[in-house]
Image (cartoon, helix red, strand yellow):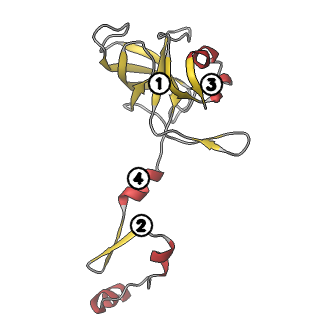
Amino acid sequence: MAAAAASRFGHSLFGGGLRNCFPGLFTTTSHKLTCNTNFLSQQQRTFIQMRTVLKVVDNSGAKKVMCIQALKGRKGARLGDTIIASVKEAHPNGKVKKGKVVYGVVVRAAMQKGRCDGSEVKFDDNAVVLVDKQGQPIGTRVFGPVPHELRQKKHVKILTLAGHIA
């Protein structure tokens, strides 16, 4: 009732107070309050779960893979976890071909992970390094930054192949 009266007379219920505290969160259009979805979508980061497309950051021959199953955890995979994935895009003369089912270790995740010192680490993309069943990397090089949390998960070989450890 008050909202109808406020919109009829051209006044906002918030009086500019809430709008001034959170610039960019709310936008007013024709006296209706709408939520800016771009701001909220940047804040919602989830686990790597079934059907998540990940970038491959080694020289095994695959470009993109799609997660079939996260091997640990009920919700999904995080940094350092192993997943089973299907190759969606591949280089024509690489070791791994399109359609092959492979194992991978998550080396970059958009979901934040807390560290012991109170800081948090998160990346812009989801990336994976392909490994065999024993956990040894298929490729011989790893591109881009790799977090040092992989040392706790016993993926030391990936850390030695990486050019930059974050």
Residue 128 circle label: 1
Q: Is residue 126 above or below residue 38?
A: above
The kind of residue on which mark 3 rests is Leu
Q: Is residue 117 above or below residue 54?
A: below
The kind of residue on which mark 4 rests is Ser
Q: Which one is closest to the eye, mark 4 or mark 2?
A: 2
**Which of disc 1 and disc 3 is earlier in sequence?**
1
**Which of disc 2 and disc 1 is earlier in sequence?**
2
For label 1, count other residues whose C-alpha is less than 10 Å away and answer few (under 14), some (14-19) or many (20+).
many
For label 3, count other residues whose C-alpha is less than 10 Å away and answer few (under 14), some (14-19) or many (20+).
many
Secondary element type, mark 1: strand
- Quadrant in which the C terminus appears: top right
Residue 24 circle label: 2
Considering every residue shown, the one lying at the far front of the view is 163
Tell me the residue that label 3 is attached to. Answer: 150
- Which residue is found at the position 56% from the left and 12% from the top? 135
Q: Is residue 44 above or below residue 15?
A: above
- Mark 4–mark 1 Cα distance, whole angstroms, equals 23 Å
Residue 40 circle label: none
Tell me the residue that label 4 is attached to. Answer: 41
